[in-house]
Image (tube, rainbow, N blue to C red):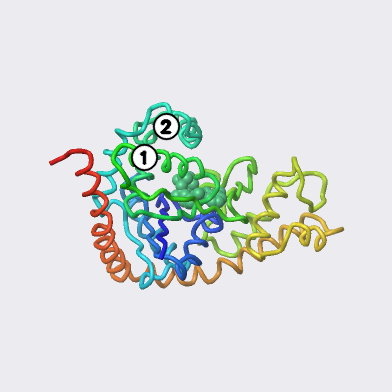
Amino acid sequence: KEVVFSAIQPSGTITLGNYLGAVRNWVTMQNEYDCIYALADLHTITVRQTPAVMRKNIIDAYASIMACGIDVEKSLFFIQSHVHTHAELAWALSCYTQFGELSRMTQFKDKSAKHADNINAGLFTYPVLMAADILLYQADKVPVGADQKQHIEITRNIAERFNGIYGNVFKIPDGFIPKNGARVMSLQDPTRKMSKSDENVNGCVHLLDTPEVIMKKFKRAVTDSEAKVRYAEGKDGVNNLMAIYSAVTGLSYEQIEKDFDGKGYGDFKTAVGEAVVEELRPIRERYEKLVADKAYLESCYRKADEIALKISSRTMGKVMKKIGFI
Ligand code: ATP
Ligand code: MG
């Protein structure tokens, strides 16, 4: 079976964007692939965290992802910081990654503009740690949202460079980006992607939002003055709502335009909100049960941590030997 690897940062409450862009595919891929998933907590400290909040976010994110349908009997779901090979391989690979190529990463440019008071070296070398995450497991496919395309590309480049020097050490992974929902935009600023760490909570639908909150956020979503539901250039807000609606219901844009012909944005926003509420309802219910049982959650990640260490140590050992460490 081919190996799938992906990870998500516990940098806040999981969003509808994370779900449609990545986690939904994590769930469906479980039946066909050997799936390895991680909570990328090492990545989150590239932005300053409050310790108590971070501890809570890690548990909440673990429970929410499981609630989306990750089956720990089928897949590995571990915590990155518990598996020391990730930091180790990241260091080694950083010596095979050029300053120039990291400088071209758009996420670094975006995040350093947003956190101008803390442009730390970890934020800059973030893609190297992500490459290590993926390459440790010899992954074939990496299900991610469209924003991670560039990071998958640099992962491939680093792996090819390393293989070019030392022979076939790493499998070259492919990104797996969904047709629908790959780039969910903020409901308040549809030119920017919806993000867990966004300060404007109204722009962002969280998996654990109550139905009332979800409906309110969609009703307030920014649109335009044309008052016609159609997908077109310059209609970022409506395009985003159509993309969400299409990703959740499976309806084509054509069908959506037909269904809402002659209706206003109010009706459309209500329909999108209701579709999202129904999609997220079972997830929130499962989450409430899971998060109440911390001992069970801990037993799940401890077991996965151990197996992940065993698998990743094989690659790490090979890397050390090839480089010349004794
Ligand atoms: P942060 O703001 O802290 O970076 P994030 O919302 O970008 O948080 P990540 O943990 O960085 O979340 O990414 C987890 C996964 O979710 C990745 O596969 C990423 O591509 C995907 N993803 C993130 N935002 C979106 C979005 N708006 N639409 C679709 N997929 C997304
Ligand atoms: Mg992100």
**176 left or right of 222?**
left
The residue where tag 1 is placed is 128
**Residue 237 placement (x, y as % from top left):** 70, 46
Dot 1 amino acid type = Val
Residue located 39% across and 65% down the image: 34
Q: Which mark is residue 102?
A: 2
Residue located 33% across and 39% down the image: 162
Residue located 39% across and 35% down the image: 123
**293 left or right of 19?**
left
Closer to us: 163 or 25: 163
Closer to us: 210 or 72: 72
Looking at the picture, does residue 148 appear above or below residue 103?
below
> Which circle's residue, 1 or 2, is located before the other in the chain?
2
Q: Quadrant of residue 322?
A: top left
Cα gap from disc 1 to disc 2, whole angstroms = 9 Å
Looking at the picture, does residue 281 appear above or below residue 260?
below
Question: Is residue 192 something one can see in this rendering?
Answer: yes
**319 left or right of 57?**
left
**Residue 10 placement (x, y as % from top left):** 40, 52
Secondary element type, mark 2: helix
**Residue 224 placement (x, y as % from top left):** 76, 44
The quadrant of the picture occupied by the N terminus is bottom left
Pointers 1 and 2 in contact (C-beta within 8 Å):
yes
Dot 2 amino acid type = Leu
Secondary element type, mark 1: helix
**Residue 254 placement (x, y as % from top left):** 78, 58
